[in-house]
Image (cartoon, grey):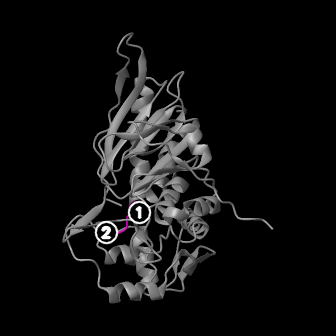
């Protein structure tokens, strides 16, 4: 997660080209090192601008609590874990850690927020993640693999957090954006706003509609300019994508993306993007990471997580979708037809 930079948030009115009917009010600002777009429909200028302080505060609170390397509540927790100490946590902190733990277990730990030391080994825990460098030494990789830190090494009881594994280092890079979007949407709802999109670097949650039509969003192509697909959202839905095309470094001609497979401790290589639709942004964010890591096994992990809408793009460009996603996702730019793979749900017997 990047440090929080907030610029003055001013809403501008978007107009239709022909009849000049108001369509939406839109604002842009920066947080988590990326641009955040907020679009509101059906509100006047005063109501829109009254959301400025609310949105700034919601993102600032998330950043102050969960930043992975600047001083925060999270860094304090990680120091206690490293030192083998227990630490008091507030109810909201405990709730989010327990949610991450639940999602990690359901993902068979392919979403592994306890793997902060592994991302540190690879140089992705810092502001200079893009700089060229050699991969970690195999001895360091093996040390991490042998310690096998997972969220199951963390327990919280009566407001006190402890860990049985000092190699645990919590990092919510694959989770915090979704959580921040959920917080922002809740803040907007509390202001009486019912039609909006909060888009953080291409990942988003939308509520309501754009007047008489749904919010329609595009999915970025992982290897070409433009979009690979589009989808119309219904009511209250989140769309999150994990891909290998934004955060990576190169060394001696080889590309190392930031999504690490905790089973091998090396960058995942069975997908180039994974897109998830769900009602909850934090869950969609975590699931997109887990399914990207899962690669060919994504139908099984999706079933375990309870995710029904998935689109995954393989390294050879082949697009795979779950049946429900195929019903709603529209491929564009002459893409080849997607392969439909049903979600694999565990038997109850």
For label 1, the SS is loop
For label 2, the SS is loop
The residue that disc 2 covers is: 124
**Depth check: 50 or 115 in front?**
115
**Depth check: 31 or 230 in front?**
230
Residue 166: tell me if it is visible. Answer: no
The answer to whether residue 6 is above or below residue 330 is below
Magenta span contains residue 28: no
Q: Is residue 27 left or right of residue 107?
A: left
**Residue 218: % across, % down:** 42, 38
**Residue 198: % across, % down:** 44, 41
Q: Quadrant of the C terminus?
A: bottom right
Q: Is residue 250 left or right of residue 105?
A: left
The residue shown at (40%, 27%) is 25
Range drawn in magenta: 64-69
Tag 2–tag 1 contact (CB < 8 Å): yes
The residue that disc 1 covers is: 173
The residue shown at (54%, 21%) is 212
The residue shown at (47%, 65%) is 293
Residue 195: tell me if it is visible. Answer: yes
**Residue 157: % across, % down:** 63, 76
The answer to whether residue 68 is above or below residue 52 is below
The answer to whether residue 8 is above or below residue 166 is above
């Amino acid at each position: 997660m990047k440090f929080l930079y907030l610029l003055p948030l001013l809403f501008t009115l978007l107009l239709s080209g022909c009849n000049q009917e108001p369509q939406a009010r839109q604002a842009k600002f920066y947080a988590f090192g990326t641009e955040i777009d907020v679009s509101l429909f059906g509100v006047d200028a005063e109501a829109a601008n009254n959301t400025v302080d609310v949105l700034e505060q919601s993102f600032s609170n998330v950043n102050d609590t969960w930043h992975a390397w600047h001083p925060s509540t999270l860094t304090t927790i990680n120091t206690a874990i490293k030192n083998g100490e227990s630490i008091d946590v507030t109810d909201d902190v405990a709730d989010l850690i327990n949610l991450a733990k639940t999602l990690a277990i359901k993902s068979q730990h392919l979403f592994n927020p306890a793997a902060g030391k592994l991302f540190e080994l690879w140089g992705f825990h810092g502001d200079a993640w893009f700089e060229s460098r050699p991969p970690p030494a195999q001895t360091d990789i093996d040390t991490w693999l042998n310690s096998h830190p997972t969220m199951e090494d963390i327990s919280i009881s009566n407001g006190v957090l402890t860990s049985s594994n000092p190699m645990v280092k919590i990092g919510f890079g694959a989770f915090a954006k979704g959580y921040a979007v959920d917080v922002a949407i809740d803040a907007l709802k509390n202001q009486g706003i019912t039609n909006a999109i909060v888009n953080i670097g291409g990942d988003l949650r939308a509520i309501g509609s754009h007047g008489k039509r749904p919010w329609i969003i595009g999915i970025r192509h992982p290897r070409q300019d433009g979009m690979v697909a589009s989808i119309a959202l219904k009511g209250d839905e989140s769309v999150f994508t994990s891909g290998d095309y934004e955060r990576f470094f190169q060394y001696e001609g080889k590309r190392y993306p930031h999504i690490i497979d905790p089973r091998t401790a090396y960058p995942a290589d069975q997908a180039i993007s994974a897109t998830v639709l769900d009602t909850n942004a934090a869950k969609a964010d975590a699931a997109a990471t887990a399914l990207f890591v899962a690669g060919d096994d994504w139908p099984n992990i999706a079933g375990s997580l309870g995710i029904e809408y998935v689109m995954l793009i393989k390294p050879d460009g082949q697009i795979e979708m779950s049946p429900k996603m195929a019903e709603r996702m529209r491929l564009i730019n002459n893409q080849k037809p997607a392969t439909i793979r049903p979600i694999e749900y565990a038997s109850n017997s």
